[in-house]
Amino acid sequence: MKPMLTVAEMTLRELARRRGVLLLLLLMPFVFWLIRRDSYVGQSIRALLLGISWAVSTAALFATSAARELEPRLRLAGYRPHHLYVGRMLGLWLLGLAVSVPFFLLTVVDANNLRYAGIAMAMLCCVAVAAPFGMLIGALLPRELEGTLLLLTVVAMQMLLDPASPGSKLTPFWSSREIATWAVDHTDGGYLTRGLLHAVVVTTLLIVTVAGVFGVRLRRRRHLHHVPLT
């Protein structure tokens, strides 16, 4: 457990050095919320949730890309692959929770007659999904520009697709929209159940995929070169 906590701390320290990144982590959800604030309250809440998802996913993408050069040295120091990706994921989850707290308080102050427990659960689902999702993109697309464009595409699809359409259920953050509907519109518990189930399934699939991708990549010792026998 200690190696994972060490990697989590390293991840948070690396992100803390990027003050601009931390500012954007807070700015993006706020802008998403502010743009929709004058419309129906449900739209502002859903936009805020997407902003949190985008922010945490982007942080995960940058953290994964920044750690590429460090990972071989950590492997030589005795860290196993799961120490690296699980530790980084823990650090990103902690960061996501820290980002979500002020925005949860913002919804409490700004909006009335909401199921605030549902808003909190929706934010937790966003953070739970966003961290492994951003890490997976960072592992598959080593260049940050391509990864950022892919994240932007996913968020745009999430905003434009009808939540009731079958295709929207294939998007990673569909759960937050279902739970937000339950929290804002006071619908039946089916929305909450579907949202939580979707979040659990997507998070589990992402974690398993991240474990597979990182397990294969981190076992490739590119820093070692075999000298042919003569």
Image (cartoon, grey):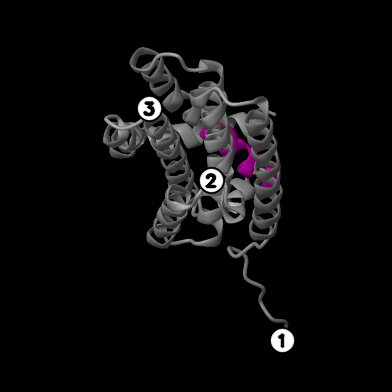
* Tag 1 secondary structure: loop
Query: From what the image shows, is residue 52 above or below residue 207?
Result: above
Q: Which residues are magenta?
A: 81-92
Q: Is residue 178 above or below residue 155?
A: above
Question: Which circle's residue, 1 or 2, is located before the other in the chain?
Answer: 2
* Res. 163 mark: 2
Task: Kindly identify which numbered label has been placed on residue 41.
Answer: 3
Count residues near mark 1 (Cα–Cα under 10 Å), then give few for <14, some for 14-19, many for 20+: few
Q: Does 82 appear in magenta? A: yes
Where is residue 85? Give x, y as percent: 62, 44
- State yes or no: discs 1 and 3 in contact (Cβ < 8 Å): no
Left or right of 34 in this view: 116: right
Give the left or right position of residue 154, taking residue 82 as reference.
left
Depth order, front residue of 112/57: 112
Q: Measure how far apart labels 1 and 2 are at the Cα level.
A: 64 Å
Give the percent coordinates (x, y) of residue 180.
52, 30
Amino acid on which disc 1 is placed: Thr
Q: Nearer the viewer, residue 89 or 70?
A: 89
Going by the numbered disc 3, the residue's amino acid type is Val
**Local SS, label 2:** loop
Local SS, label 3:
helix
Which numbered mark, 1 or 3, is in the foreground of this view? Answer: 3
Instruction: Tell me if label 1 and label 2 are in contact, CB under 8 Å.
Output: no
Label 3: few (<14), some or many (≥20) within 10 Å?
A: some
> For the view shown, which residue lies furthest in the bottom direction?
230
Residue at (70% x, 42% y) in the render = 201
Task: Tell me the chief SS of the magenta region.
Answer: helix
Is 121 rendered above or below residue 163? above
Q: Residue, x 63% and y 35% (percent of image)?
A: 195
| Residue at which label 1 appears | 230
As drawn, the label of residue 18 is none
